[in-house]
Amino acid sequence: MTRHGVLVYSLTMTTKSAWRLDMNAGPIFVQIASGVRRMLARGDLAPGQKLPSARDLAAELGVNPNTIVHAFAELERMAVIETKRGLGTFVREDAPVASLRRDLLQAAAAAFSAEVTALGISKGEALGVLREVLDAGES
Amino acid sequence: MKGFKTLFWLEYRRSGAWAVALIGSLAFWAWALFQARAVDPVELSSVRTVLLVIAAAVGALVPALMIGRLRGETRGGQYQVLLLTPPSGTAHVAARYAFALGTAAVYFGILGGLAWWVVGMAGLTVDASTAAQLVLGLPLYVVGTTIAPILAWTVLLTVFVSAYRIAGPGWIPGTVMVIGTPFALRWLVEGIARAAYSLPGWPILGSLGVPEGAYMTASPDGHEPEMIVDGIVHIPQEPLWIMLALTLVLLVIASRIWREVEA
Amino acid sequence: MRASLSGVTKRYGRTDGLSNVSIDFPVGQVVGVLGLNGSGKSTLLKLLAGLLFPSAGKVTVFDGPPRENRAKLVYLGENDSLWTWMTPADAETFMKGLYDDFDIDRYRALLDSLAVPKRKTKAMSKGERGRLRLAMALARDAKLYLLDEPLAGIDLLSREKILQSIVREWHTDETILFSTHEVAEAEGLFERVLYLREGRLALDARAEELRDQGRSVVQAFREVLG
């Protein structure tokens, strides 16, 4: 969580494009919930941090506030966030960040694997490419 | 009436320029009356009378135009906006009417003053209370019997035509109303003539406490009074009441139709 | 139901602006009214506002006739409908004097956030006039909003500001009906969308359900009306 100290992003400053909402990609509330989980996994959001109100976020993104409320309800159900009466909505201190990271990585891996299959590349070659990319990413 | 004040304000902002121009034009008429020159004092009086009559006609026409305005802003989206405001049709009609009538009343009041001045210049002098009657009472009587109903008729026509715009060509009911008016007028005038003087008339120079026998002296050119006029002329009061009643009826109909207007 | 149409037909001469339409609008719903020009969108909104009367059927708003409930609804028409000599201050006088539910502070705040200039409307651009009219509409505390093409002819930045303002000012017990051609921009706002074609209801769906089926509101628009 190296970016903690330099928390540049506040959700109220993010724009529609940062959220990558795609009206063709399924219900918005699902995309919002995923977006919050992704931000948490990447450290753009920290446990205990306050989320913008449903209305503010809705205004930023140009979506119906009920949609945000629906997304928040989902996230609450997943025990990622919680609502404190009178104070607002917060990321839970015990939010499962590690497992969220794993999930995201797994999803990325699944996408990679699907591509490998689609291209008909062998596992060995695929792993080689993966190693190349990871090495390049480190430098 | 709810919202009347704001609607009146709106009417003032919409037509205020017209009203000011109209009343300001009286300066022109005053100047024209003063400038009129003729050799014969009788001819001079008739020239001035003609000017006054034209001024009176303008005073009737312009407020009617202020209400009319069938084109332009009234037909645009502003009409929709007005239809959806909370005040009742009565308030809307009353505000438009009150402004136009108020303008007309001021105009004719001042015109009455000019007429009195013309009368004075013709050599007729009258005592103060009689002058007050002439300057104020007569214009009010004239306005009440002619201008008031004319303006009410204009309001009704405007609302009427708009109301049936969608249901069919709006010009049909409008035309019917316009064509039917002379017939209705003739019937009205005949009715008034028959009714006139059934009630005691108003002594034009004898009411408001001036005793019987008050007189008007006519001294053309400032010579010795050539005649003494026993100035009790009676004006019938029926026309005024009938026309005011008619005005009220027209306005009530206009208010009712306002409810039915589509936009 | 906040509003409803029951078997409503509106005839214009020989054509039907709306043809036997029945729709219910619950409290708190934000509805997109979509369709091509002449499909009946404006007619629908005007019938609900009480500016038009149905040729057949019944329109009910706040459990009564629309015109009688006009003080409780906000209608923002397509046409520029302010007097050309009016300034935002004049508009304030107008609204304040005629509507009990007009919130002056909110109006001024909206004028500010929508960057409406202090000029007569005849000296304003179309976008500025649109924003002024929207400020007048949103400053009222009504329970039913009928917005007919509030984004028409308005520049991109103004459109974004307008959509943001609508979202900010909306309360959960307010019903908003919103017709627009800028479907893509506004689609996120709609809880429900109505597609009108030639005076009839072609599709009535929840926006999120459409997306669940893999179609955006825009896509469904093309499919239903194309």
Image: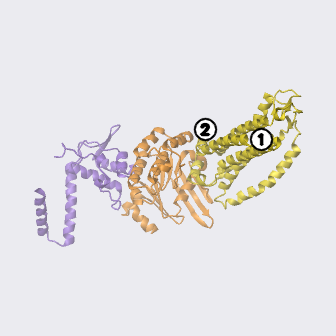
Residue B228 versus residue C19 in the image, above or below: above
Q: For this rendering, which residue is in front, C70 or B255?
A: B255
Q: Position of residue C189 (x, y in %)?
A: 41, 53
The chain coloured purple in the image = A
Q: In terms of sequence position, does the residue under pointer 2 or pointer 1 come before the other?
A: 2
Disc 1 is attached to a residue of which chain?
B
Which image quarter is the N terminus of chain B in? top right
Q: Amino acid at mark 2?
A: Lys
Direction from residue C116 to residue A81 in the image, left or right = left
Q: Position of residue A99 (x, y in %)?
A: 20, 51
The chain coloured orange in the image = C
Residue that badge 1 annotates: B142
Q: For this rendering, which residue is in front, C110 or B117?
A: B117
Residue C197 versus residue A80 in the image, above or below: below
For chain B, give the colour: yellow
- Residue B70 visible? The answer is yes
Q: Residue at x 20, y 72 (%)?
A: A119
Direction from residue B242 to residue C193 in the image, left or right = left
Q: Residues within 10 Å of mark 2 (few under 14, many from 20)?
A: some
Secondary structure of the residue carrying numbered label 2: helix
Residue that badge 2 annotates: B5
Mark 2 vs 1: CB contact within 8 A: no
Q: Nearer the viewer, mark 2 or mark 1?
A: 1
